[in-house]
Image (cartoon, helix red, strand yellow):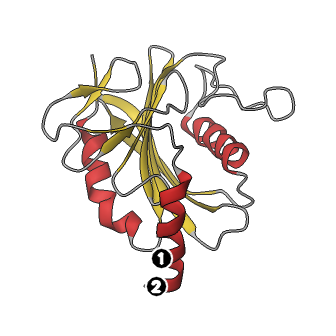
């Protein structure tokens, strides 16, 4: 592992989280509701939830800090709504979810959303396949990207389904250097545990 790159990443993770963010350790074995929605998961040990939400229908957890790894929940995004909170609706509007979207359309909307939110010049979907999610037919896709002026590559996996015309999804993103593999199984266990009540 490149110690210089890791040192820079660790230093960045300390200052990157907003000072006003509060972190709450999630219960390891209790089923919890996420993203102000009907979706519930079992967290597993070590995940912390930030009080800063990516949207009204979103929630973010991290194991080692949001620069290094994070799990994001999208809970019941309806037709015509974006996947995250708009930052500049006039100049950089986020793509909107459509209830008739197919899995590749959702992946494309996610890619476009992340390109705008992170400023990534090279966000790419690496693979896509059908997958069960919360007991419903859904999808799984993998991706990678970098942010501007960073050498750190991030990798991710997302799973979701459109149920009752609404999008439910969980994504896991982490630094490709060590962190992605270190917590992938834990993140996949959260995805496997998802249920819609």
Residue at 66 percent of width and 57 percent of height: 123
As drawn, the residue found furthest toward the right would be 91
Instruction: Give residue 37's position: percent from left, percent from top.
Output: 38, 18
Instruction: Give residue 20's position: percent from left, percent from top.
Output: 50, 37
Residue at 68 percent of width and 43 percent of height: 117
Look at the picture and state if 79 lies above or below 187.
above
In which quadrant of the rendered image does the C terminus lie?
top left
Instruction: Give residue 60's position: percent from left, percent from top.
Output: 43, 38
Residue closest to the eye, 176 or 134? 176
Q: Which residue is mark 1?
A: 6
Q: Please tell me the numbered disc located at residue 82.
A: none
Q: Are marks 2 and 1 in contact (CB under 8 Å)?
A: yes
Q: Residues within 10 Å of mark 2 (few under 14, many from 20)?
A: few
Look at the picture and state if 151 lies above or below 116.
below
Instruction: Give residue 29's position: percent from left, percent from top.
Output: 12, 38
Q: Which residue is mark 2?
A: 3
């Amino acid at each position: 592992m490149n110690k210089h790159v890791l040192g820079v990443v660790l230093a960045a993770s300390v200052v990157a989280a907003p000072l006003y963010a509060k972190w709450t350790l999630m219960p390891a074995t209790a089923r919890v509701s996420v993203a102000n929605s009907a979706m519930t998961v079992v967290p597993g040990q070590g995940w912390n939830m930030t009080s800063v939400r990516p949207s009204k229908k979103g929630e973010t957890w991290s194991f080692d800090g949001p620069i290094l790894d994070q799990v994001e929940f999208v809970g019941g995004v309806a037709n015509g709504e974006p996947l995250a909170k708009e930052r500049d609706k006039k100049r950089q509007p986020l793509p909107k979810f459509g209830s008739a979207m197919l899995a590749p359309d959702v992946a494309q909307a996610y890619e476009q959303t992340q390109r705008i939110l992170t400023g990534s010049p090279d966000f790419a979907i690496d693979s896509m396949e059908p997958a069960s999610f919360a007991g419903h037919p859904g999808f799984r896709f993998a991706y990678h990207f970098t942010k501007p002026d960073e050498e750190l590559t991030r990798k991710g996996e997302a799973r979701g389904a459109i149920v009752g015309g609404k999008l439910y999804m969980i994504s896991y993103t982490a630094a490709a250097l060590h962190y992605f593999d270190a917590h992938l199984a834990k993140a996949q266990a959260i995805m496997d545990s998802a249920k819609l009540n």
